[in-house]
Amino acid sequence: MKRNILLLIVITTFFCSCKKFLEEQSKTEIIPKRTSDFGDLLAGQGYLSTDNYMFIETMLLSDDIQYFSSTTYPPTPTALADYPVFQWQADFITLCQQSGSLSIDRFNTWKTAYKCILGSNIALQYLDGSIGSQSEKDWYKGQAYALRAFNHFILVNTYGNPYNDSTTTPDKSLGVPIRLDANVTEKPMARNTVKEVYNQITQDLDSAITLLERERRNFSPRIIDRSSAHLLASRVYLYMEDWTKVVENASKVIEVHPDILDLNSNTNSIISTSNIECLFWYGDSKNYFDNINRVVSLSDDLNRSFEDDDLRVAGFYCDRTPDFLKFLFPSDLMDNKWQVDNSNGLTWRTSEAYLNRAEANIQLYRITGDVSKAQAALDDLNKLRVNRYLTGTYKPWTLVSGDKLLQQCRDERRREFTMEEGHRWFDLRRYGMPEIKHIYTPAPGENQIFTLKKHDPQYTLPIPPDALQRNPGLVQNKQITTLRKPD
Amino acid sequence: MKRKLIPPCKGAWHSYAFFLLLVFGLLMAAGPIYAQKIVLDTKVSYKANKKPLLFALKDIRVITKVRFTYNEDLIRRQPPVTIDVKDETLEQVLKKILGSELEFAENFGGIMIMPKYNPETPVNVNKLGYIINGRVVNSDGEPIPGVGVQAQTSRQGTMTGSDGLFSLLVEEGETMKFSQIGMKSVFIKPSQSESFLKVTMEAAPMQVQEVLVNGYQRIEPRLATGAYFKINAAEIMQPGVPTVDKMLQGKVPGLMIINNSGSVNAAPTMRLRGTSTFMGNAAPLWVVDGMIKQEPVNINAANLSGFLGGNYSLMGNAISGVNPYDIESITVLRDAAATSIYGVRAANGVIVITTKRGKPGPVEVTYNTSVTTKRAPRYSDYNLMNSAERIQFSKDMVADGVPIGQTNALKIPGSYEYLLGQLYAKQITEEDFNRQAEVLSSRNTDWFKLLFRNALSTSQNLSFSGGNGTTNYYISLGYLKDLGTAKLDENQRYTFSGKVGTMFGKRLRVDVNFGGNLSKKLGYADQIENAFNYAYRTSRTLDPYQSYPKAYSVFPAVTEPLRFNYLKDLDNNYLENNGHSISTSVQASYNIGKGWRLDHQTSFSVDAFNSYSYATDQSYYITGIRGWNLGEIYPESLKKQTSIPNGGLGAVNYANSLFLQNVTTLAYTRSLRQSKDQVYFNLGLETNARTTKGAQEQKSGFYPDRGMQFFPTEMGNFVYGKTGLTDLKENALGVYFATGYNINNLYTISANVRSDASNRFGQYSNQKFSPNYGFGFSWLAKNEAWLRDSKLISDLRLNASYGIQGNVISSVGPELIATYASGSNPLINIYDRPNVQLKSLPYPDLRWEKTHQYNAGLFVGFIDGRINADFNLYKKLGKDLVVTHDVAYENGVTNTFLNIGRMNNTGAELRIGVVPVKTRDIRLAINFTNSWNKNMIVDTTMRNARGNYLAGNANVGGKSIGSFYSYPYTGLDKEGLPTVKDGVYDMQESSKELLPITSYLVYSGQKLPKLQGGFSLDFSYKSFAVSAMFVYHFGNHIRLNYLYSNNGLFGTYMPISEVNVNKDMANRWRKPGDEQFTDIPALKTFRGGTAPYVYLPVLDQNGVRERIDVYSIYDYADSRVVSGSFLKCTNISASYTVPSAMIQRLKLKSLNLGLSVANPLTIASRKLKGQDPEIDGAGSAALPITPMYTGSVNLTF
């Protein structure tokens, strides 16, 4: 009998102590160990996901936009709730909140960009210890560096003074806190200077380019590769006014991707992975039009800048507002980019490389007087324009004065990047923060004109109040202290 | 001397063919043959040196387990013995040690020692002794070992053996005393003619007498050191109440039960000794017959996002499927010494249910039935306006220039505002207007009558019980149909339960339990408002059978507004939740001998859950999605734009889970020091595994009335079609050890330790095994020599315990955890990769949450238990509780987990039972149960949002959990608008320094009571019995129902035309000077048509100046907070037991008739005006609790 009992105990114990019984398991969760796991996580966290928002506030701030009241449909009181952004009010987040806006959480590029930076930092912190080949690790690290540079770049341009601010120097103006690790801290974090941030950005870009040049893979435009990294570098150096580096990096892009989509022969969406110009495609269409009861359209100012034979107006980028929608969009042009392709998000395109290189060459021409630079710029601009304008009526540009050429180049840039990626807002900032005006129509027929003055403090957005509250180490940007009134 | 001790077969068995497990019983009944042996031939090895004979005999008794009967005085007089024998028979040994004066004989399985017959000694005829043989049993007929049997004059004494048998030499006319701890002593004067004396000992009154079962352990009462509370189901049974948890209200010290809803499917909120976690589940654990009861629904919540009507709270809690009539007793384990063998799950206490087992004897059939009717709620219960008052209110609004209907885009015909609009637009004449207004004014639609019913519920229970002593069985069937007063509120339950226990030989006992239940629950689907909410807030001027416009279509082309009718919606939305559960457990207890016992229990249960929900094409929900009213004709092109052009939406959800639990315990009990001391230990191993599989599907185009078929469109499938699978596996392993030592039957010390492990993902490998400890001490003061004979104090016990319980936070771990996207997120993200997102950064420093628990208890009984008091004090110190802190966005995550939370619970529990009258015919018993709990959050670094302070879910240092705050109201101003301390109407006006929200809002009290409990009165006279039960809550506060926030238009709070309002609104401020008489604000709008706003001198959670409309301020003002204390009569019942003489002709054993009324009376603050203080939350949509009348019949035959 005793033996039986002993046996029973042994069996029970054996059954229960089975290692497998206590093996941790989950069908929905993983502890990333392999390099590809971190690649997946980078795609999910470091790249902008479709449920996070960027650029919404910058879109409403630029002079490309017209904001209307809604008259009949849809009958929501929230339609007008985002007007404080459009009016360049200093505490627009608070005001929007009080007017019942549904987009408060979307006016938080700060939060979104740092979330993506964490994605990059996780990859950079853990990839070296992961299981996988060095080549694969380098490939993901290159992407992570490029993404970290990009997000810091967006942040410093949204919440810091422009790098080329003529009233100060970048080492004196405050940028944003630089984040380089994936650890959570409760300690206050101070803002780095604009210069420090840009130094970090260029350093990250150097790392990215080195690694991505080594790993010359090209799967799809959905992943940042060497060309995308070069394009970003050309953009960053453009903002830093390092013209030769702009030319250098833009040329690297054009070397690999010289083609421009000819709108004369193509009816596909411009913002699409199927566009031959597409270098990198990310995010969601919500990032330039988030469909949240807001009634916005292209500004008259932008309307006027389009020439008649511009194919971009005829259905690709924008469209003539049909009569039946006039009650809703009194403006002549409606933005149309997002309506063509279901899968569209935001893209980096070859056209930007041409425009960046052209602008840098024009600047070099203005500085040195070297006409070959001007000609190079004209070549680039005409290469773009010949594909954007109706064949037959299109006439190439010819050499004019440096200032005029610069203006032509900037106008073309504005038309090319209508409502995209905050380009216009950032460009206005680096063009010296000129005075711009917004016409606000609270009710049909009632117009109020708001003015953003030259060098207006609102050119640098206030840090969102909740971000300030969470981090006592932050110093708020200088703001106007009263409610901005219409002229 | 050989004798057959037990008849081998006790008559014929009543056979019930369907009863499969009876087989065991039949096997047993065939052959229990009592093993006979010659006691004197037992081999003994024994060594002693100059030991008193008395002790030597006790030693031999312990070795041989042979019962000795002797006169103690005689043995004491004998010289000490010296002996050294090996393997000699008992006979030889006894001969050696008993010397010449004594002789012995085998008698009745024991040895009787007596003085040697000496013919020279004169025999006193009067003192002639005779031998009494017998057996001591308890009230269940089970033998009691170790009972001291003593002849009072001759000092002959013995102790019963393991079979309860004894034999003793007594003198003529002498009294015998039978005594044991925990039992009432029995005195018997046996007569010589008594051949076999059967002594039944009863448990001492109001004392935890029987063996305590804490689920995994059987503890003798004197060895229990923890805070146990045991109550018999018979004491709390309330016919007509479907689940046992509701019956426990006010009856268990330390247990707080709040009935949040009058719905038949609602499970009450339960807290045992307060709340001790911020993030985890705070409800106690239920254990039924050693088997842990799981919550009925376990579906991956992410899979259910976007599903229709998923109201799974309908499914009730872990014991919703247990028929209260099957319950024998309930033991509540409150402190760490009692609960620590359950490990981490028991941090909130354990409630152990023991179900009925068969009683030996011929089959006994019990049938009981009850019929219950619940009264429908009615307008007189609430302070609401009737049609005429509502129309007068509208008229007054017009007179006051309040912009009625101005912002109301859809004018509802059936309202005064609508008629007025027509009059102004000259669509009707003034005459028509007056006539129609008169119609409305007298319409007085009774929504409560239309949407509620006087619900009739029934329950039927049938049980069989019987057995032959070695094999007993109990089987029951139950049916319950419980209808709520709200028309869609219904619960039907079928239960069956069976229990067979049998002894295989003397050592092995096997119990087989099996049971199951089937339930069908109907309720309100999430897409429609519940009936109470609708009735409460809808104007009585509306025609209940007319469809009124409610909203515009999403399509501009559809100009006709969408129409809504609540009665129609009730018919076109459906929610049914079904649960099926079958469980079986086999308990085997093997008595190894020498104090060792091995217990094993294997249980498994299969729980199936399914839910059907739909909304038809006629429902308003589908109308809104479709974009036009059914029957209106629109072009085909529109049909292509809508996602549900035909049919409605249907959803099904299935889940099956298999739960397997194994508990193996090795127990050892041994008496030491001549039975003065006792030692025990239990070593246990528990494993359990739960596998859940399920599928969920939702599709559009559903036609429930056309063969339940779907006709979806591609777009409908894309937008509303959902499919999900659930596959979960949860394994856990626990090892526990419990030990105790009792000295002199006076002091007991005990210790428990348990360690748990599980397969939970991403847990701390170094802390896979979490220790839980408990230590206890008890002092049975009544057994002290100086108290033993006290007539006044019949019982006195003190106990104290301390323990630590760990709790684990499952959402984070030491390693980086990523998760695959779920719910509505795509599985492949836009970057063509699996959609993997960060779930948790590594938290290598996070520790277990720990709760230190101290308990001190005192139990005292007076005058034979006529008065007794049970008093407990406890302190629970929660340390290292995990809380989340917001961190800077720069971290990339919004919060972090920290072990900084601390929460303390201090409390006292007092239960007093008094039996002031107890005669043969009359008995009166009064019981008071009082529990005081003080909960305090110690940590002061918690961060909360404003809304949390107002709603009462903010965690504030120094305050209790559930504390809520209000605006400091300062009365009405001259405009009739509510004012608030330092609030201004214009942001520019104030130069005040901005305060943090906590220093501005005022503390309004806590939602949960500080002191709660109940008292009961039970009175019986002969066959009549009357009882009453009262429950009370003290020290809690409640907000009055909103006057404005519930019925106003968004942004303005002006009551809209179809909404009914509180009668108090008639007394609102209307003209200057009214502020002297009324506290109800004026109805006013500011420029832009919104409610007036006030700027508070505080910062909101975004760091900006707080701006609140005055009506929200009024509804959340401190002036609208009243005491939530109440005294409720929960039950009054009367019963009559028909005398057996009257029912004998009916061949009945007993017949009992009962009548009861539940919830007849509530005494609470007068300011509540009909609002139920037990239902939390102003504006709560919970169904009301109404009086309930039950009649019941109970038969046994």
Image (spheres, coloured by chain):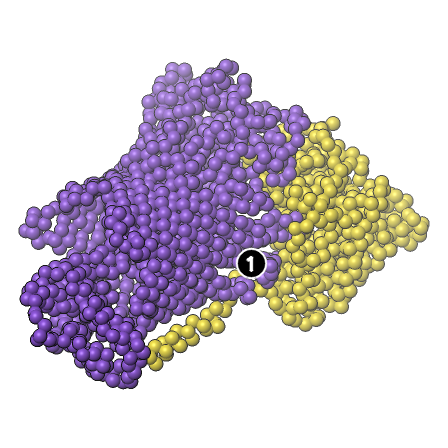
Residue at image point 34% right, 77% down = A5
- Quickly name the residue at label 1: B847
Q: Quick one: B442 or A162, which is closer to the camera?
A: A162
Image coordinates for residue A352, horizontal then vertical, percent: 77, 53
Position of B949 compared to B1133: left or right? right
Q: Quadrant of residue B192?
A: bottom left
Residue at image point 27% right, 59% down = B181
Residue at image point 17% right, 61% down = B152
Q: Quick one: B417 or B785, which is closer to the camera?
A: B785
Q: Is residue A298 above or below residue B338?
A: above
Image coordinates for residue B23, horizontal then vertical, percent: 20, 71
Residue ranking furthest to the front: B120
Chain letter for mark 1: B
The amino acid at mark 1 is Arg
Q: Quick one: B796 or B1068, which is closer to the camera?
A: B796
User: Which chain gets the yellow colouring?
Assistant: A
- In the rendered picture, chain B carries what hue? purple
Residue at image point 78% right, 55% down = A200
Position of A186 compared to B961: left or right? right
